[in-house]
Image (cartoon, coloured by chain):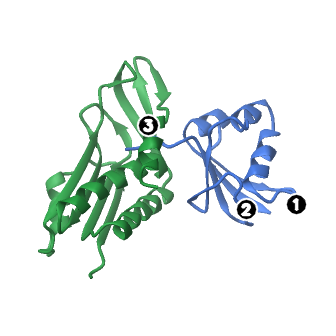
Chain colours: A green, B blue
């Protein structure tokens, strides 16, 4: 079996899902299913109106961590390709933050692995959000529900 | 032992520092002991590294357990639980 193609991008710029999808599928007629998750900036968090947020990360470790997560997915499901794109820097409501695409011959591997990648990204990849609420900025707190979501795969 | 320290997010702000190189006393060999060493630097550090504070750590850019062993010249990072995605 061919080795699954893993692509990881950490960038300030926005991304186009069509472009990510085209690159993922390129010259891979064995793909029959692509699952795709896109996370976007909400205008409300914990009951407060959010005007913007800043995404800090740990350059080097971030890319390494996302690659490790993708590799774990590849070793667990039958996948042809995995793409992870995560933005950093200043973001506003409606902006895209993250995209995860997983491609497989059949849908179940694609669906499950896409969730797996997001659950681990949320709890292991070194990103931190600081949101602007009215005149104040505050660090977003990690949620216990994200840790629970990760544990179901262990 | 010489360590290259990195601090991120709210921890970086609290400490007013994002990176430093520190020389450790010989008896400090693991991450738990390093945390206690840092907590002894003053009130701000004591609060930031208090045992009940949820902090994560990485050695040479890989997540590690709270009691992981240290190596000379390692890059050691402390940060709050992550919130990406």
Mark 2 Cα-neighbour bin, 10 Å: few <14, some 14–19, many ≥20 = some
Evaluate if marks 2 and 3 touch, with contact meaning CB atoms under 8 Å apart.
Answer: no
Distance from Cα at disc 1 to Cα at disc 2: 13 Å
Where's residue A48, x and y in %? 38, 18
Where's residue B81, x and y in %? 54, 42
Left or right: residue A8 versus residue B55 is left
In the structure shown, which secondary structural element does the residue marked by tag 2 occupy?
loop
- Residue A54 position (above or below residue B25): above
Q: Disc 2 marks which residue?
A: B69
Q: Disc 3 marks which residue?
A: A145
Left or right: residue A75 versus residue B39 is left
Q: Residue at x 42, y 29 (%)?
A: A131
Quadrant in the picture for the N terminus of chain A: bottom left
In front: A45, or B11? A45
In the structure shown, which secondary structural element does the residue marked by tag 3 occupy?
helix
Distance from Cα at disc 2 to Cα at disc 3: 30 Å
Q: Residue at x 37, y 38 (%)?
A: A90
Which picture quadrant has residue A28? Answer: bottom left
Q: Chain of mark 2?
A: B
In front: A153, or A2? A153
Mark 1 Cα-neighbour bin, 10 Å: few <14, some 14–19, many ≥20 = few
Question: Tag on residue B26?
Answer: 1
Q: Chain of mark 1?
A: B
């Amino acid at each position: 079996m061919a080795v699954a193609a893993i692509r990881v991008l950490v960038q300030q710029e926005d991304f186009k899902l069509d472009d990510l999808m085209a690159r993922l599928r390129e010259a891979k007629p064995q793909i029959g299913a692509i699952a795709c998750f896109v996370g976007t900036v909400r205008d409300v968090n914990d009951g407060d109106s959010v005007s913007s947020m800043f995404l800090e990360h740990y350059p080097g470790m971030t890319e390494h961590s996302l690659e490790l997560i993708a590799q774990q997915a590849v070793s667990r499901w039958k996948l042809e390709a995995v793409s992870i794109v995560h933005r950093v820097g200043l973001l506003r409501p409606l902006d895209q933050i993250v995209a995860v695409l997983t491609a497989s011959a059949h849908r179940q591997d694609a669906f499950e692995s896409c969730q797996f990648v997001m659950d681990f990204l949320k709890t292991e990849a070194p990103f931190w959000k600081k949101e602007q609420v009215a005149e104040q900025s505050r660090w977003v707190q990690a949620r216990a529900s994200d840790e629970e979501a990760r544990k179901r795969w262990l | 032992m010489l360590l290259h320290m990195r601090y991120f997010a709210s921890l970086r702000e609290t400490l007013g520092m994002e990176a430093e190189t520190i020389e450790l006393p010989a008896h400090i060999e693991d991450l738990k002991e390093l945390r206690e060493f840092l907590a002894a630097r003053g009130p701000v550090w004591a609060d930031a590294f208090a045992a009940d504070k949820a902090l994560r750590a990485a050695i040479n850019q890989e997540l590690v357990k709270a009691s992981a062993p240290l190596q000379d010249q390692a890059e050691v990072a402390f940060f709050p639980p992550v919130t990406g995605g």
